[in-house]
């Protein structure tokens, strides 16, 4: 699936959801959710290319695997949180969407702590 296809799927789903809003509003939400899941499914399939590139990058610059794993986790948390929060907002539950985003930010902070600690230890060695 290309970005053009993803855009067309998304726009078509939104236009159909808007037209369904007058009759059965909940069907529009389901339709947008299904389109979002379809786009997300094809987006995840692109991860293989990204992971292969990250492995090559790791070999070239000899970076610790923990850092790349952390980067992938942070990206996944961000993507899932944005998707979930957007669906909640579209359904009219902005408060739940905001809570998902706050939880995601705290999760990213927790996942990134080992990298931050390693950076601080490295800086401490250079300064001592």
Image (spheres, helix red, strand yellow):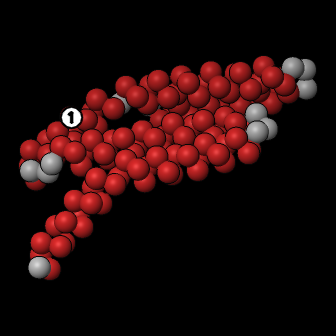
Q: Is mark 1 on a helix, strand or loop?
A: helix
- Specify the quadrant that holds the N terminus: top left
- Left/right of residue 98 with respect to residue 39 in the rendered view: right
Residue 108 in picture, x, y percent from top left:
43, 49
Of 38 and 67, which appears nearest the observer? 67
Which quarter of the figure has residue 47? top left
Residue 26 in picture, x, y percent from top left:
81, 22
Q: Residues within 10 Å of mark 1 (few under 14, many from 20)?
A: few
Total marks shown come to 1
**Residue located at (67% from left, 42% from top):** 97
Which residue carries the number 1 mark?
Answer: 52
- Left/right of residue 26 with respect to residue 97 in the rendered view: right
- Left/right of residue 111 with respect to residue 35 in the rendered view: left
**Residue located at (37% from left, 25% from top):** 45
Of 42 and 118, which appears nearest the observer? 118
- Specify the quadrant that holds the C terminus: bottom left
Question: Does residue 5 appear anywhere in the picture?
Answer: no
Residue 92 in picture, x, y percent from top left:
79, 38
85 shown above or below 36: below
104 shown above or below 51: below
Of 3 and 83, which appears nearest the observer? 83
Question: Does residue 70 appear anywhere in the picture?
Answer: yes
**Residue located at (62% from left, 21% from top):** 34
């Amino acid at each position: 699936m290309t970005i053009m296809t993803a855009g067309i799927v998304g726009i078509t789903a939104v236009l159909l959801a808007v037209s369904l809003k007058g009759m059965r509003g909940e069907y529009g939400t389901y339709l947008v959710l299904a389109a979002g899941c379809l786009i997300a499914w094809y987006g995840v399939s692109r991860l293989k290319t990204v992971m292969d590139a990250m492995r090559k990058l790791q070999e070239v610059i000899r970076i610790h695997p923990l850092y790349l794993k952390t980067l992938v986790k942070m990206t996944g948390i961000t993507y899932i949180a944005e998707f979930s929060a957007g669906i909640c907002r579209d359904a009219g539950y902005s408060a739940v969407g905001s809570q998902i985003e706050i939880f995601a930010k705290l999760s990213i902070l927790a996942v990134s702590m080992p990298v931050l600690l390693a950076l601080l230890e490295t800086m401490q060695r250079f300064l001592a």
